[in-house]
Every structure is written in structure tokens, then in C-alpha cells.
Image (cartoon, helix red, strand yellow):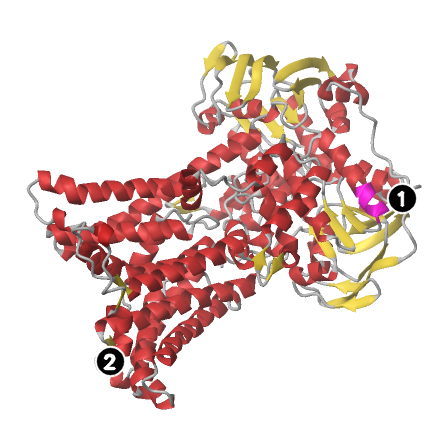
Amino acid sequence: MTETALSNPPPLPLVKPGTLEIRGISKAFPNVQALTDVSLDIRPGEILAFMGENGAGKSTLLKIINGDYQPDTGTLSMNGQQLTFSSPQVAHKAGIRVIYQEPEIIPGVDVAENIWVGELPKRFGLLDRTRLNEQVRGSLKEYGFESALPMNLLGDELSSAQRQLVEIMRALKSGVRVLALDEPTSSLTDDEVDRLFALVRRLRDEGVAIIYVSHRIKEILQLCDRVAILRDGNLIAVKPAAELNDAEIVRLMVGRELSSVFQRKQAGTDREILRVENIKSNWHDDVSFRINAGEVVGFAGLVGAGRTELAKVIFGELPKNSGHVILDGQDVTIHRPDEAIAMGIGFAPEDRKREGLVLIRSVLENASMAILKQLSRFHFVNSRLERSVISKFIEKLRVRTPSLDQEVGKLSGGNQQKIVLARWLAAKPKVLILDEPTRGIDVGAKAEIYRLIDDLANEGLGIMLISSELSEILGLSDRIYVMQNGRISGELDGKTATEEAVLGLAIKDHFAANPKAIEISNQKESIL
Amino acid sequence: MSEKQTKQSTAPVKGGDTLKRAVGFIGTDNLSLMFALVFLVFLVTIVSGWFGMDGGDKFFSWQNLMNSLAQAVVIVGLIAIGETVVIIAGGLDISVGSIASIGSVVAASVLVGVGTIGSLSFLTGNVVIAVMAGIIAGMIAGAINGAIVTTLRVNPTIATLGTLAAFAGFAFLLAPEGKPVGVMTQPNFTWLAQGRFLEAAAIPALGGAKWTGIPVLTVILVIVAIFVHILMSYTDFGRAIYAIGGNATAARLAGINLSRIKILMYMLSGGIAGLSGVLLAARTTSGNPINGNGLELQAITAVFLGGAATSGGKGTIVGTFLAVILVGVLNNGMNLLGFNTFIQRVALGLLLVAAVAISQWRQARAESSRTRIANAG
């Protein structure tokens, strides 16, 4: 499919290629020196990786390139001509585009209009719908994203992956010299990643300078030509990818050696803690599985296979048409998340910011939210008890926060995820559902979260681990279910499973058209 | 380091730090309101004199503070307190004025035993029953709002715009032949609005100021404000309200029953509006179906002026309380200085816009500092 797309590239808007020269850039924020004297060339026809732990300065550098921030010192220039970006719009005009993880999408309008927003084709002063659709359909087809990004979806129905695709299509439409992708694959499945890579390589061959920011070393080595490594705001090294390997990159990033991918040792018990029988819903066709106490059960599959929705159906957030959930031997009926929690199920959603946390409230309030009832007497929250309970978990998880009263939105991604986990540790569930628990998190925090999952399972929890990172699924799971098009397409033993086996089950008959493969994002939230 | 600071924040504030404690209670966000209040009082009492306007000197008389000012702010103040809760949760209740009208008619009817409601009552003349009836009528109206918003999933602004009209009409239907119900002959009831506590007591410290006692109305406002403040600061209900306003999806996924909390919240707002209707009936000596008209605008103005965020999740009862006083001083000052009511209305409208603009600006600033820190690196 990708091949056919490649054989017939659509014309890209003509933009003269250019080298973006970054010279002596420094940037400080209150209490943080985010960047110190960074100099770097971003060359046309090359894919350059930015790597570093969270807080290393990658995002700040991207934001300076994109015109979101102005550097304190240092310059940007293109082909020797100095550039000053007062805003992202100015950067876009110069042909520089940064694709962030959470692009701006207009909720109520469809994909086609979202892509062409600001420059919609007009006819007699009205929107020329036919022309718009033709253009968008054409370009989606050429890049191989037809099925991944159905044109008629509205902005608020798009998954994270689809939102990114919209943003990439926007950039391509108006012509790019420098295209930066910030963690583009963190929510994509392997199949989508392949297509994205094909696209990125093609753009490189056409003379676009590509910046690729990712935590995934394997991807970087596979895709990129050069790797720039940042640590604590300093540019540590810029090396050709061919001269690097996993261990070397990790060493440069963290300044110390890290044991490679986590491998869980202990297996679960035989006591069944959760059994799901014949669930049918708008997203699922007869799904059955079981999780034992002390077991980590991985759920692999492509985006849109129905894994997140399965978690939400079990948790009472999405409705089911039929089927049973048997929790600890009892057939339970769950209509709402609070009922699920009361029965001993916890759920850490995929999208921390949209679904996991109340960003404007404190660490304490976010972490204690699921156990407020236990902490209250006559509806009065016992704040001394609350603080002592929560601070225990905050310490255990080694959350870096100045205090329990810190606004959660001001913490880094890894620490935010730990707050969500602290909430569920405090709630002491029997079954904990983790949906992409390490998405967008740096290497160090990731390792901590793996260890935590392992510990929790050893303490007897049943863990349902949904992840799109195969190494994570393979390293942590005792058993693996692979989902595809709303069904379970296979079950594998965690010890013996291979990437190939998982992938094989995930894409068994992927190309058979199935409308359910479209990821339907969460129900729209009616504002009070 | 985190541990140390956590402990610090849990440690009780030392007794000597009265100022610190006061600031903590008022909240740093509300300090600007205090300054605005002081500045406004300065304008009314001192600056007005420079321009040759009379009346500013009367501001600090006990008569003015306790009669005109303290009483004038009570009705709007009560409604604003209920409205604060709704706005913190990210909602809006426009129907409060009409609910107050219903409360006013119901309480008066029950008290004197007239009309549809009055005929059902077997305890005419009982003030407690009449007040309770007004509050319960308001709570029922609030429950209807809550049900429309949760079960029918109607946007709260639209839902309460609809019930604003519907409840206003209903207030007329409840009144016998649509006419006001007089309560002049019920001194126990009108005492709620006209009575004074400590009327006879002499306070030597006040010296020359003429002591006239503390109005019952003011005491009721303070009690309700403290009640709701406690509700919002120390209970699981208050936590849920802030969480829902901050991120409703996250709140639901963390086990908060949104429908239940929202219905309770609209009942609280409705019940308080009902109470303020009862007090209006006592003050105007009639349960008039137009009693509550227009109160929602003043109340919502006060809430936003008090620092609540239009997008929800932020706001305090203390802030609203200060804002209510600010609006009261503005009106009172303009009265004293002889501005006509039309100018006052223009000022109030502009104040609402200014309050929301300031709140938006604050949010934008907070947002940018948040993303800056989260992305610093």
C-alpha cells in the first residue's frame, strides 16, 4: 500500500530547501536554565533526532524554532539570513513547522476543514465543499492515511494519532523547509508508524530538513541520519546514527548506564480475579478474557482495535450491549466509574491531561480523589489523614513536587503520571487497568513505573496493561491478549511471545475493511 | 526537599502570624479585591469631596453602613453565594432570579394561607414553616434544573435560560390570580428583613457613631456565607465541585458521580435563591411574582468579580463575598453622591464585563506560567 503511494507522489508546494542554523541559543525560565549555548545545523535532506530525558531542553528548543519562545541570547538563521520569530505564524511563513503531540484541532468541524483551516477553497464566496474534499481525499490517499484518518470525522472525534496526522497534513499543504515532529509515534501503532516513516523519508528525499523528537531509541536508529543529544539544557553530542547504539544513546542521555528493557520475573497466581465473558458493545464483538491475581496481562493491538474502549466498558464509562464482568467470583453490574471503583477496579487512562487529572487542582486533591469517601466522616474530609495517606504514596513513587499543594499542571509528564498512579495505589483496587502508562515519559521515570507495575502484581493485584509499545508488553506481561477490530485475535504466553507473533495477531486481517477500526474517541462531555 | 515543604505546609500557623493567617483566609487572589474596595471607599468618601460632591461624608455613619449598605447587599449576596458554587463547577444558573420570585410567592402564600399553595397549608401564620416552604420550593426548582442538565444533557446556560422564563411564569401561576400576596400583617415575618439584633445595646467603643443594631438580614447572609464556605472548603462535596469544574471527565473517571453532584449543586443554588426570595417578601412586605427579576445579573457579576473562572474550577466564597460588598459600596456610594439609577445600571453592566475580562486575563497568565514550567526543558 505504501509502495503504491510512493510510486506516484503528489506535487508538494515548492519551497526552496535551506539549512536552519542555530547559534549560541540560551533560554532561562524562573529557577530553570532550560538551554545553555546550543549551536546546531539542521540540514535539508536529513533527519535529525533530538534526544534527551524530559527536562533536557528538547521542548524548549522546539518552541524557540517554532517562534513560541524568544531565546535570551543566540540567533536562528536560514541560509545565512537571520530570522526572528515573534510568533508561530511568522515561523510557518518561513517554512518552519513543529508538529506537537497535542495539536490545535477545531472540535466541531470535519477533518478536511481542519486541514485547510484559514485557506478553505471558496466558490462564489461560499465553501467549495467538492473541491475541498477532492483535495483532501487525494492527499490522504497519496500518503496512505485514508483508513487511518476518515475525512468525515469531526475534530472532537479524533484520537491523538489522528490529530497529529491532521497537523502534518496542514504543514504539507502549505509547504515546509523544516518539519519538526515531537514524539509523533507515542500514540501510533506499529503499522501507522511504518507509514509515518515512509512519509518522513520521502519528505527528506525531497529536500525537507526533518527534526524528529522521540524517546524511542529503536525508532531513532532506524529512521534518523544524525542524533543530537541534550542533557540539562546542554547539547552533549551530535553524531551520525550509524555510529550509535542503544546503550551508547542511553549513556549519553542520562549520563549513566541503564539496564536494558525491564524483564518481569515472577508469574501470577492461579486465583482468578477478573473474568470478562462475551462482551458485546458498539466497539466489541464477543470479547472474553480473564486476569488472575498477581498477574500482569498485556493487551496489544493497533490503535482502533478496541483496547481502550474495552477498558472503559469494564470501568462503566462506556456502555455494553451484553456480556458479563465477574470480579473476584461475583457477577457485577457496573454502570458508572464510581461503581467500578467501589467494587475494586482502578483505571489510569491513556490521556493524562484530558482524562486523568484536574490540572488546575493540587497534587493532594488529585491523588485523593478516588478515596475521598474513605477519608471523610459525615462528608467532612479529614485532611490530616488525607495528607498522611497521600504523602506516603507520593514518597513511594518518588514524585518530584515542591509540595502536596502544588498545581498538578505544573509538574512534568512523568510526575503527572505518577500522581495518577498514586491515586490508584491509595484506592487499593483488586484490578488495575493501565492504559499506555508510559506514554510520553522519559527513560528514568519509565523504568520506575515498570518496577512499580511489577511490585503491584507481586502484591496480588491483577493488572490489565494496555500498551502500544511492544517491548513494554513483552517485558512485563505474564500473558498477552492481542486485539484486533473489536475482538481478541489471540492469546500468547508472556515468556515465549515474540514481537512477530504479537504483530501477526494484531494485523491478521487488518486490510479487510471494517468500520469499527476507526477509533471512536470518548463520548463528548456535556458541559454540566 | 519535597518532604520538608510538605511538612511545613501541614504545620499549624503560629499564633503570632495573625496577618499571615488573615491573608491565607482571604487568599492572595482576593487581596486585589480588598485593595479595590479600599480604593472605592477612598473615592466615595474623600475624592468626591475634592470635586465638590456632597454626601461622601455620610458613608461611614452607622446608619449608612448598617441600614443602606448591609441590607442592600444581602439579597444579591445570598444568590451570588449559591451561584458561586455552580460557576466553580463550570456551570451557570441564570434562573435564580425567577426561583427567588417563586420562593417569595410560596412563602407569602403559605404564611397567609391564600392561593393554590396556601390552601394546602394547615399551619398558616407559622414563620418557620413559611420560610422552609420558600426554601424547599427553590430546591425543587433547582432539582428540575439539575435534572435537565444531567439527564437531558442540555447545556446549563440554555437550560436555565429556559427555566428562567418558565419559573418566572410559574411564580405568577402560584400567586392567587397572579397578584402579589401581602404580608404586612405578619410582624414576625417582616422582622426577618426589618429586625435588628442588639438594637438597645450601647457600644462605648463606637463613640460618636450612632448605633442602630445589626440587621437580621446581614446575620442571615453571614451565616449562609460561612455555611457554604465550609461546604466548599472542607467537604467531599466541595472537592467534587472544584474537580468537576477543573476537568469533568477526569473527575468522573476518578469516581465522582457527576449527575448526583450536579443535581445537589443546583438544589443548593435554588434553595439559597428561594431563601433570598423569602427575605425579599419580608422586605417588600409582599410575596410578589416579580420580586426576583434581574437579580441573576447582579449575582453573576459579583461571582466573576470575586475571581471565579469562567471555565470553572476556580473561585472562592470569600472572593464572592468581597465582590458583593464592592458592588454594594459602588451602588451605595453613587446613591449618596446623587447619581441616578440609570448611571448605576450602566456602571454595573460595565463592571460585569470588566470582571470577566480580568478573570480571563488571570487565567491566560496562569496558563502561560503553567505551560512554561511544564515545558521548561
Residue highlighted by disc 1: A494
Q: Residue furthest left?
A: B52
Q: Between residues B41 and A25, which one lies in front from this camera angle?
A: B41
Q: Are marks 1 and 2 in contact (CB under 8 Å)?
A: no
Which quadrant holds residue B70?
bottom left
Q: Please tell me how many numbered marks the rendered image carries.
A: 2
Residue A466 appearing in the image = yes
Residue highlighted by disc 2: B183
In the rendered image, residue A456 lying in the magenta stretch gets the answer yes
Classify mark 1: helix, strand or loop: loop
Classify mark 2: helix, strand or loop: loop
- Residue drawn where x is 37% and y is 45% of the image: A125
Chain part drawn in magenta:
A453-459
The image shows residue A18 at horizontal and vertical percentages of 55, 15
Q: Is residue B166 above or below residue A99?
A: below
Q: How many angstroms separate mark 1 from mark 2 (CA)? A: 79 Å
Residue A406 appearing in the image = no
The image shows residue A490 at horizontal and vertical percentages of 86, 51
- Disc 1 with disc 2 on a shared chain: no
- Residue drawn where x is 24% and y is 65% of the image: B199
* Closer to the eye: label 1 or 2: 2
Q: Chain of mark 1?
A: A
Which quadrant holds residue B373?
top right
* Residue B139 left/right relative to A64: left
- Residue drawn where x is 58% and y is 38% of the image: A102
Q: Residue furthest top?
A: A80
In the rendered image, residue B315 lying in the magenta stretch gets the answer no
Are there few (<14), some (14-19), or many (20+) residues within 10 Å of tag 2? many
Image quarter (top left, top right, bottom left or bottom right) of the N terminus of chain A: top right
Q: Is residue B297 above or below residue A85?
A: below
The image shows residue B249 at horizontal and vertical percentages of 58, 53
